[in-house]
Amino acid sequence: MDAPGKLRGEGHIGCGASAVLEAGATALHKAALLGNPDVAALLLDHGAFIDQQVPILGHTALMDAVVYKHDAVVRLLLDRGARTSIRNHWDETALDLARRDGLDRIVGMIEARNAADRAAMRAQPLAAPVKQGDLVEVERLIAAGAEVDARLPMVGSPDDDYTSLAIAAREGHAEVVRALLAAGASPRGAIGLFLGTALHEACYFGHTEVIRAMTEDRGRADVVPAELDAQGALNGMSPLHDAVWHGHLEAARALIEAGHRLDLRTHAGLTPRELAAHYGYDALARLLAEAEQASQSPAVSPPTPNMSNAAG
């Protein structure tokens, strides 16, 4: 017998702001459906994933707010960065749903957000030449005052929430990376949907020269070094794990030489060496085993000079 006031089959999986109800909706979907912007804001403040899609319909919270005509929740979700390009299982975006139902105010809000995203893309001139590896143009734009740490808007592209440095690292443009770092670009802080760092990007794709550019000593106190041991929030992988994941031997070697920790574990509990063994990367596993052994060996101190015969 069901408890009073509880619908048959209703329940939840997990806990916290992103707990999923049995029907596939999250608490944020329910707040959007009921039109409660205060609860929606509270959930977002506590880590609710704004773009979660319901398995049955493919709806995001933004889509539910549109369908149930809750302007205030739509405005909140748009202001908090909800993506407007996501499509449900009928291939409809939130804008398509608003237009279908003749919701002119909501149509206007979504169109204004899309226009703002396009303007934000145009306002970041570094992105295109960085992606192309055009060092001359990158240096010209930096000299003209281009913002080196600006992030691209969340529009449903591979560059969502990426900085110019992260794009350069991903594309393997080492000299562009050096130019951006020299101009004050920060290699720290999570970027993109995987919430890794720019160094993670270089390691994932095996760009050894970029790794060296990001870890070399530039002899300048104002140039922030990359976080060698940063672990991604999604999977717990460090830059070294990312290099190992795809079998990049030389990239892993560069990280070891730079002093990357060898004992960090992913959310699955694997060190870089264990990850290499898991994927059958024998050469990488040997390299990492040798590095572990070397790190555990006591340092050999130079002999103490005999000062008894020193000239006085």
Image: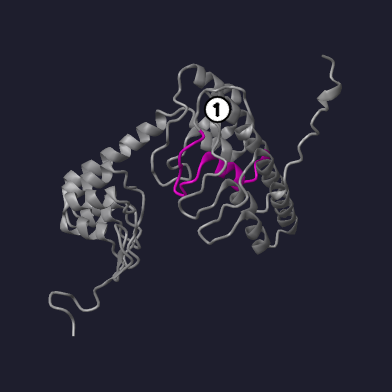
Q: Which of 264 and 245 is in front in this view?
A: 264
Q: Tell me residue 205's x, y (percent).
A: 62, 46
Membership of 285 in magenta stretch? no
Most extreme residue toward the left is: 4
Most extreme residue toward the top is: 312
Assign the N terminus to one quadrant of the image: bottom left
| Left or right, 83 with reference to 173 | left
* Residue found at x 42% / y 31%: 150
* Residue found at x 52% / y 44%: 230
* Residue found at x 29% / y 43%: 80
Can residue 27 be spotted in the picture?
A: yes
* Residue found at x 35% / y 66%: 55
Membership of 205 in magenta stretch? yes
The part of the chain drawn in magenta is 187-208
Q: Nearer the viewer, residue 211 or 76?
A: 211
Can residue 103 be spotted in the picture?
A: no
Magenta stretch: dominant secondary structure: loop
Is 34 placed above or below 123 here? Answer: below
Is 54 placed above or below 217 here? Answer: below
The image quarter in which residue 274 lies:
bottom right
Q: Tell me residue 138's x, y (percent).
A: 54, 24
Q: Tell me residue 161's x, y (percent).
A: 43, 41
User: How are the colours assigned in the image?
Assistant: one colour
Q: Tell me residue 35's x, y (percent).
A: 16, 54
Most extreme residue toward the right is: 309
Q: Nearer the viewer, residue 110 or 82?
A: 82
Tell me the amino acid under the disc marked 1: Leu
Assign the C terminus to one quadrant of the image: top right
The image quarter in which residue 259 lies:
top right
Q: What element carries label 1?
A: helix
Q: Which residue is identified by label 1?
A: 181
